[in-house]
Image: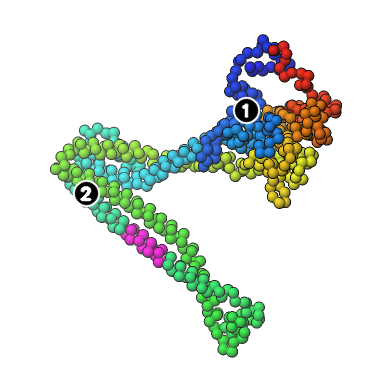
Amino acid sequence: MLEFGGDDLDGFQLRDLEVNTDSDALRSQVGLRIGLPEVRFEPSLYSSRPAYSIGLGSAALFCFQGQDEIANKSLLFHRQAERGIDQTLKDSVPFFLGAVQEDQATKRAQLRDARRDLRRAELTLADAESNAQTTDITLQALLTEAHTAGMTDRPTSPDIRTAVAVLSSIRFSSPKELDRASDLQAQDARREIEGQRTELRRQLKQLLAERELLLDFRDGEGSYQQSVALQTGRMTSLDLLRNREEIHGSDDQAGYCPVCNQELSIPDPASNQLEDRLRELRQELVALAAAEPNRRAALTRLEDAISESRAQLQAVDRALETISLRANDAMAVSDAENREFIRGRIDAILGRHSYTDDNHLGLLKSQAEGATARVIALEQELDDDEAREELTSKLVALSRDMTAFAKRLELEHAENGVRLDLAKLTVVVDTETGRIPLHGIGSAANSIGYHLVTHLALHRFFTRQHRPVPRFLMLDQPTQAYYESEEEKQSGRPSDRTAVLGMFRLMKDVVDELSPNFQIIVSDHADLSEEWFANSVVHNWRRDKLIPASWL
């Protein structure tokens, strides 16, 4: 049953109880009221794990410590031993600490879409630029085809705009309005195009020869560079020679032995010559390295020119093919059919041309740049390294409270520093001899104490940072390690009253600090005589009953 009201909402009678919701709706409604809608998270882009959700059920894992959980040396959180809960805790702790934002899943989905849009924009732009490079040649060849087919009296055009205008008039004109070109005009057009093809073939052959020469030069230069580097390495030992000027007050190398630095009776210039040659070789290596970028750029320009020549040659070959089809009666292609075929090509090419003009290319470039900027911005917002650093910062802040609380309870090794190991979901103390996890610290009192300080530090952080976690912590028998007999349990007097008093005093101080935004609910045998403790007791189950007698 779920019922919302103000501060004066009273308890219900048995007759008032009714089923009006289910567990899923209950979690959703309560989660919304504490600022925790169902949040969906996406793992990193290269992770194989599926997406996961964080809701009230995830937050509630921080709010309970059962009797067998608070004293457990191997488990730190509620239901941690259940299948899948440990991974849920590892996934949700960064979010509840504020290291991961709740719109992370949305942004990862946006990043996937942005990358897809970027790939599409880049492919569209590349295709448009490729078409733009051959548009002029294609349109001129198409105009030549139309001229040889008698569809226009203009065999060539001075620029793309004029060619588009002429071809557009052919594209939308009626065949009856067109005059057939004469045989002489067709013959002249064929001869002119054949001359163009011959020249293009010559240019292509020359470009290929230049590319081969450049490649041969690069390969030969590479071998030469290796040879120079080898000689330089062999001569590098000269750098180990001591400075003659420092020893003899002179830089004359020839008059001294290069090994023992003793003055020679007969000067030997070999050392100087070797050092001079070493400097020359090093300068050659620098020059060769500097030439590499220029050679690559020249090779790229040649390859672009080769691609353009091939495209021009293909366009010319297509024009000659069209002329040959018209001249070959054996092909049984009528003039009308040939014209309609050319008209269809004009229609297809002009339709594609609308995507390759300068204005549209500029628009496509702007779209690609915008998509790139969008991807970069989302990648920065979803930077996994930054998220890890943010999580580390939060865990360090948490560690300070854990250490302070542990010292106050005088827990073992507390003076060395206490922290939460998120990867192992345990408490760790760092000593000079190494890290000690919770299960290695020993004693039930220490285990309970470290459970307590961890959850108090977490809830102090959650409350102070306004994180969407229910503002309560429920503990079942946190003092169980201090009752050695049944008589002590019944009387509520623990064996170590000082230690138990310290635990409850710590809980009270944390509640007082965070009041009225946090409460701790404890079910325990302790019955201390301090006034503040007695004022905190709401029910004494030795007298009261959990279920009202009137309901039975």
Relative image position of residue 35 (x, y in whole percent): 64, 27
On-image quarter of the N terminus: top right
Residue 397 appears in view: no
The residue shown at (81%, 35%) is 496
Which residue lies under the disc numbered 1? 56
Relative image position of residue 127 (x, y in whole percent): 39, 43
Q: What residue type is labelled 1?
A: Leu
How far apart marks 1 and 2 lie (CA) works out to 81 Å
On-image quarter of the C terminus: top right
The residue shown at (20%, 36%) is 337
Q: Is mark 1 on a helix, strand or loop?
A: helix
The residue shown at (78%, 21%) is 542
Vertical placement of residue 388 versus 295, above or below: above
The residue shown at (60%, 15%) is 20
Foreground mark, 1 or 2, reads 1
Give yes or no for residue 218 being in the magenta stretch.
Answer: yes
Front one among 104 and 24: 24
Which residue lies under the disc numbered 2? 190
Relative image position of residue 114 (x, y in whole percent): 50, 38
Given the current orientation, which residue lies at the most extreme bottom position?
Answer: 265
Q: What element carries label 2?
A: helix
Relative image position of residue 144 (x, y in whole percent): 26, 45
Residue 482 appears in view: yes
Give yes or no for residue 453 being in the magenta stretch.
Answer: no
User: Around disc 2, counting alpha carbons within 10 Å, would you say few (fewer than 14), some (14 to 19), or many (20 or more)?
Assistant: many
Q: Give the range drawn in magenta.
A: 206-221
Q: How many labels does the image show?
A: 2
Picture quadrant of residue 42: top right
User: Around disc 1, counting alpha carbons within 10 Å, would you say few (fewer than 14), some (14 to 19), or many (20 or more)?
Assistant: many
> What numbered label is drawn on residue 460?
none
Characterize the magenta stretch by its predominant secondary structure. helix
